[in-house]
Amino acid sequence: MLVFGLAVLLGGIGREKQTFNRTAIGANTSMLFLAVVALVMPAIFDLAVFGRLEEKGEMIEQLSFWTAAVLLVSYFASLVFTFRTHKDVFRGESHHTPVLGRGVAITILTFATLFVALASEILVGQIEFVTKSLGWTELFVGLVIVATVGNAAEHSTAVMMARKNKMDLALNIAVGSSTQIALFVAPLLVMVSQLMPSAMSLVFHPLEIAAVIFSVGVVTLVSQDGETNWFEGLQLLSVYVILGVFFYFLP
Amino acid sequence: MLVFGLAVLLGGIGREKQTFNRTAIGANTSMLFLAVVALVMPAIFDLAVFGRLEEKGEMIEQLSFWTAAVLLVSYFASLVFTFRTHKDVFRGESHHTPVLGRGVAITILTFATLFVALASEILVGQIEFVTKSLGWTELFVGLVIVATVGNAAEHSTAVMMARKNKMDLALNIAVGSSTQIALFVAPLLVMVSQLMPSAMSLVFHPLEIAAVIFSVGVVTLVSQDGETNWFEGLQLLSVYVILGVFFYFLP
Amino acid sequence: MLVFGLAVLLGGIGREKQTFNRTAIGANTSMLFLAVVALVMPAIFDLAVFGRLEEKGEMIEQLSFWTAAVLLVSYFASLVFTFRTHKDVFRGESHHTPVLGRGVAITILTFATLFVALASEILVGQIEFVTKSLGWTELFVGLVIVATVGNAAEHSTAVMMARKNKMDLALNIAVGSSTQIALFVAPLLVMVSQLMPSAMSLVFHPLEIAAVIFSVGVVTLVSQDGETNWFEGLQLLSVYVILGVFFYFLP
C-alpha cells in the first residue's frame, strides 16, 4: 500500500488526473478481496466455535488446507487471465520491440536479482541492529520496516513508472506483489506445512486482519473509478501511517 | 451468489467482456447493503448491550419489528422503481411482442410453478436421505445444498441468459431472488411471527452474518463497473467455495 | 446522511437520474474512509490488547494523538486539493459574477450565522424539554435529534440545491459537513485535550462505530457511479432510519 500511495501521490503531482485500465485493476482488487475472505473467515470461525482466537486444531488445519487450495486455483486462473485470455488489457502500454537478446536478458535479470537480494539482505541485517538500539518491537519491524526496505527496488520502479504516467504498469507492480504473496506464497506455505509435524494455519492477529481489510478497502475505493490524483495518493499514505502508528504501539 | 458466479463465468468464456446496465444492478446492490445493515445491527446491539450474542428479549423483538418494517417499505419502493419510474432501465433487452394470450400464459405459469415446486420438494427430500448417510451437518445442508438444488430452475435460466449475452436479465434473476428473500420474505416472517407466542427475531449466527457481508461485498465489487469477465465469475465462485468449506466444518 | 438521503430522494423525484462529478465526491468518500479507519483501529487495538473496549490509558492517548495528527494533515491537504490544484472540479456549477460587495457580503454572513446559531440554540433547548417528557435517552437525542435539528439550515440548502439539479453543490454540503467534523473538529479536540488533565480519546461505543461504518459504506455505494436516483435516496434514508431505531432502543 505504501508503494501504491507513493506512486499515486508522486505520479499525480502536476497532473489533473491519471487514468488506467479498470479491467486489470478490477481483477487485482477482486483477488485481494478473496484473500480478505480467506483471512477473516478462520478468525470468525474460531470466535464463533471456540469463543476465542488463535485456537489451532485439526479442524482449523483442514479449513486452512481447503481455503489455500481455492486461493491457489484462483491464482493460476489469474495467470491464464493475464497472459492468455486478456493479455491485451494488461500489456497496454508496452508495445516496444525487445532491444536485448533472450540470453543476455536472462543473464542480466539473474545478476540483478542476486544483487538486489544481497542488498536487501544487508539492509534488513542493518535494520535489526538499528531497531534493537531504538527499542522497536519485532512485529512493527517485521510488518512495517522490513516490508518497506526489503521491497525498495520494486517500490522505486513503481514510483518511476507513475512519474512517467504509465499508471497501468505502476499499479500492477504495486498491487501485483501483494496479490502474489496473498494468493500464491501464503497458500503454498500452508499446503507445504501440512506435510510437517506442526502445520501452519491462516489464523492471524486481529490487528493484522483489520490492517489488511482497510488496505484492500482503500485500494478498492481509490482505484475503482479508473482515475487517480495526488490527493488520493495522500489518502492511501495516511491510512498506511495510521496503521503503522498502531503497530508501533502494539506491545 | 453461486448463480451469479456461474452466470458470469460461463457467460464470460469466449468473450472479452460483457456489459450491463449499472442503474439496475446498483439498485439491487444498495438493497442488499440495506439487508446487511439490518442483519448486522441486532448482533452488534446484542454484543454491546448484553455482552453476548443470541439474546432474545422484548427489546430485540421490537427492534426486529421496526427494522423489518423499514425493509418492507424499501421493498415496495423497489417495485415502484422497477415497474413504474425506471421501467425502461430494467426492461432493456426484452421488447418482444407477447406470443401467448394472457389466459394461456397464466395457466402455463401455474402448472410450471407447481411442477418445479414438486420437483424441488422431491429433490430436497432425496438430499436429506443422501446427506444423513454422508454425515453432513444440518446447517451445511440447509444453507448450501438446499439453496443450490432448490433453486435449480432459477439457476439454469440465469446461466442460459448469460450465455446468450443477456446479462441484465441474468443478473436480475441471480441477484433479484436474494433481494426478494432478504427484503420481503424475511421481514414478513418477522412481522407475522410477532402475532405468535414465540416471535422470530433477526439475530443470526456470526458465520452466517460474515457470509452475507462477504457475498454482498464481492457482488458489489464485481458488478459496480458495469462489466464482467470470466475471471470475475471465477472469483465469485471461489468466495462461494471458501464460505461453503467453512459451513461444512462448522459443528 | 439524512441530508444526503433527503437531497437525493427529493432531487430525484421527477427525473430519471441526476449526475455529478465523481472526482469531487471520490475525494470526500476517501476522506470519510480515512475517518472510519481512525475510528475503528483504537477499538480493535483495545479489544486485542486489553480484551475489552473503552480502556483509556497513556498508550491510547498517544495513539489518538498521532491518529489525530494524520487526520489534520489530510484535512489541510484536502483544502489545497479543493481550492488550489483541483478547484475547477469543485467550482463546476457556480460561475456567477458576485452581486454583492465584499463588505456587505461579510456583514450579511455574520448576521445570518448569528441568527441561525441563535435559532438552533433555542430549538435544541426546546428539544431537551420535549424529549424529557417523552422519556427518550440522552444518546438518542444527542446523536439523532440534535444532529437533525441543529443543522436544519444546512439541510434545507442541500435539499434546495438538489431540487434545482445542482447535485455537486448539494452533495458537497451534505457530505462536506461530516468530513469537516470527522477530519477537523474531532482531531482538533483530541489534540487540544492533550493539554488538559483528562485527555479525550478516539474510543467510541461499538454501535456508534457500526453506524459510522454503515453510513460511509452506503454513501460510497450510492455515490461511486456519479449518478443518483430517487430510489438510492430512499435507501440512504432507510439505513438512517434503521440506525436511528437502534439508537432509540439503546439503554
Image (spheres, coloured by chain):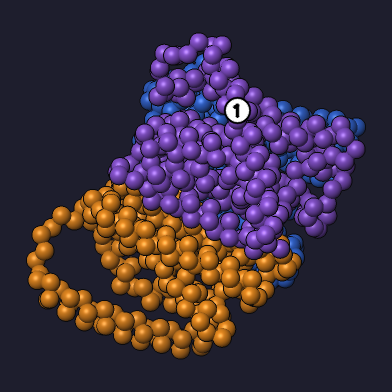
Chain colours: A blue, B orange, C purple
Residue C22 visible in the picture: no
Q: Nearer the viewer, residue C158 or C122?
A: C122
Task: For mark 1, give the secondary structure.
Answer: helix
Circle 1: is it few (<14), some (14-19), or many (20+) Cα within 10 Å?
A: few
Q: Residue at x 62, y 39 (%)?
A: C120
Q: Nearer the viewer, residue B188 or A43?
A: B188
Is C106 left, or right, of B83 in this rendering? right
Which of the 4 image quarters holds residue A144? Answer: top right
Residue B72 visible in the picture: yes
Which quadrant: the N terminus of chain B?
A: bottom left
Asked if B194 appears above or below A65 in the picture, the reply is: below
Q: Position of residue A233 (x, y in %)?
A: 57, 29
Asked if C91 appears above or below B236 in the picture, the reply is: above
Q: Residue at x 69, y 57 (%)?
A: C132
Q: Position of residue B29 (x, y in %)?
A: 43, 54
Q: Residue at x 41, y 46 (%)?
A: C9
**Protein chain holding label 1:** C
Q: Residue at x 27, y 83 (%)?
A: B114
Q: Nearer the viewer, residue A186 or B210?
A: B210
Which quadrant: the C terminus of chain B?
A: bottom right
Q: Position of residue C167 (x, y in %)?
A: 41, 34
Judging by the rendered image, the residue that carries numbered circle 1 is C113
Which of the 4 image quarters holds residue C18? Answer: top left
Which of the 4 image quarters holds residue B237? Answer: bottom left
Q: Position of residue C107 (x, y in %)?
A: 58, 17
What amino acid type is highlighted by mark number 1? Answer: Thr
